[in-house]
Image (tube, grey):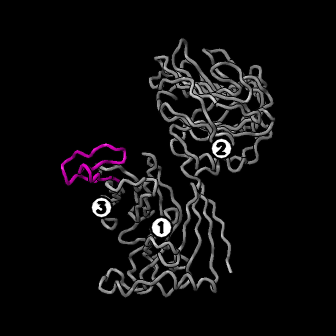
Amino acid sequence: PINKDIIHILYTDGHPNREAVNVYGIYFDMSIDKFYDLSNTEITATKPFIPSNGTLILSPTSGDNSWIEDIIVTPVGDVRYLMTYYPNYIGVNYINKEVYYAELSSGILSTPIKIFDANSKNIGGISEPAYSSLSVFDKYNNDIIWAAKEVEGICEIFKVTKSGSLFTLVQKTSDNIYDQWRPLSTNNPTEEERVFWLKQISYIRWDDFNESLESFMIAYNQITTTTTTSTTTTIVLELLSNLISIWELDETSDTTVIDSHASHNGTNNGAIINQEGITDLTPCYLFDGINDYINIPSLNNLLVDNPSTLSISFWFKTTSTSPQSILGVFNTGSTTGISIVLNLTATGNAAGKFRFFIRDNNADVTEYCTTNAYPQIYNDNWHHIVMIRNGASMTFYLDGVSILLTQTGFENAAVFSTFTYDLYLGNGNNRGVTYNTFNGNLDQIAIWGRALNQSHVDILNNNGNGLSFDNWGSTTTTTTTLP
């Protein structure tokens, strides 16, 4: 729930018509009169402190610029940010504007993503020619953004609806007599009566401000007789952020297994390539269940570099009820190692169950197994598993659904050394010896150095079709004309 003693602040370190501007976030706790950055670290610098004492949220690359739009705290206490990004910013000229979104959820700040292009030119009659449009969060429904967006040289009001990591844009006005650059929102439960904007005037002349507000009801009623355009934009949210490696397993020749994101290529040892894969991921590899494996020689710092958070996604198809290693490697002795095995628990073979095991140099173990058996995992159909480690806690998703886990290794493994053996895919590398060789098909194995969430899992699963790596980070836009 919202803590009303906490005030969240979004600010910049300059003005975009003078210098490159970074966007920062902090919060102020009124109950103890202290400022904090977004990692909950108190800002102890002498006030007024410098902007960079806060948490950097959005920073323009060379030649670009940025600005702030809106901030809101949801009923569950998440903080959401709207920001402006100006690619190829030139002087006092706010053109080519993009709108970016980020959120602070459960203490984790997301990577900003572009949710739509707002304008590509100066807009608007007698209005201030140098200014660009803005967007605001709906005060009644925080999953809605009201945005001013250019349509054929003028600004129109769009309703942007957030659903998980997807943003849908629907044009709501089609009347160029209104300025519509700066929408406002109240918490009125009636949608048609809670969104306003400034009439087409020089809006910075505040003496006319009261006369310049126009109710959204006017334009909302007009669209019933006006042809409008509905644009649906799908954003692939943050899948590239903190991605360590992804092996698409779509090779059609050679023994090199390509890491499509980084340089952690592997070598195929016996698996059959170019097999029919899941809908959007074909082809794939077929492992014989005897001695096939892929060795990855350059990921020996995987746990050293990611000691507390890790996410792993993979697709598989098998009929075997024997233990099946997805990946694994163990150093000599009771030291650093990681293993993901199907049909296995801490107490032995268990058809339909699966486990995640990680051990550090102190022999501390973080281990989770599925509480229930899922016999569908060996029914010769494609299935998708995502395992997410966040410290000592774990979350498993099977075919997009979070499942019940039993913790069997209770220490928080945290002190790791480099692997002295290669990480294996489709097998386990137990101190140089293969074990629990996978028997069936594997496709698109990916590892992140952070904790994914349900929205990421939904996108990766893609209704059971998988999502080609070519589409990670892409934007898909569909436009239809409404009567």
Where does label 1 land, which residue?
140
What predominant SS class does the magenta segment belong to? loop
Residue 56 on image: x %, y %: 37, 51
* Amino acid on which disc 1 is placed: Tyr
Disc 1 element: loop
Where does label 3 land, which residue?
14
Q: Nearer the viewer, mark 3 or mark 1?
A: 1
Q: CA distance from mark 3 to mark 1?
A: 31 Å
Where does label 2 land, which residue?
401
Disc 2 element: strand
- How packed mark 2 is, by other alpha carbons closer than 10 Å (few <14, some 14-19, many 20 or more), is some
| Residue at point 40%, 56% (across, down) | 60
User: Can you say which quadrant of the picture contains the C terminus?
Assistant: bottom right
- Residue range of the region highlighted in magenta in the rendering: 24-51
Quadrant housing residue 261: top right
Q: Is residue 183 visible to the viewer in this orientation of the structure?
A: yes
The label number, if any, that marks residue 3 in the structure image: none
* Amino acid on which disc 3 is placed: Gly
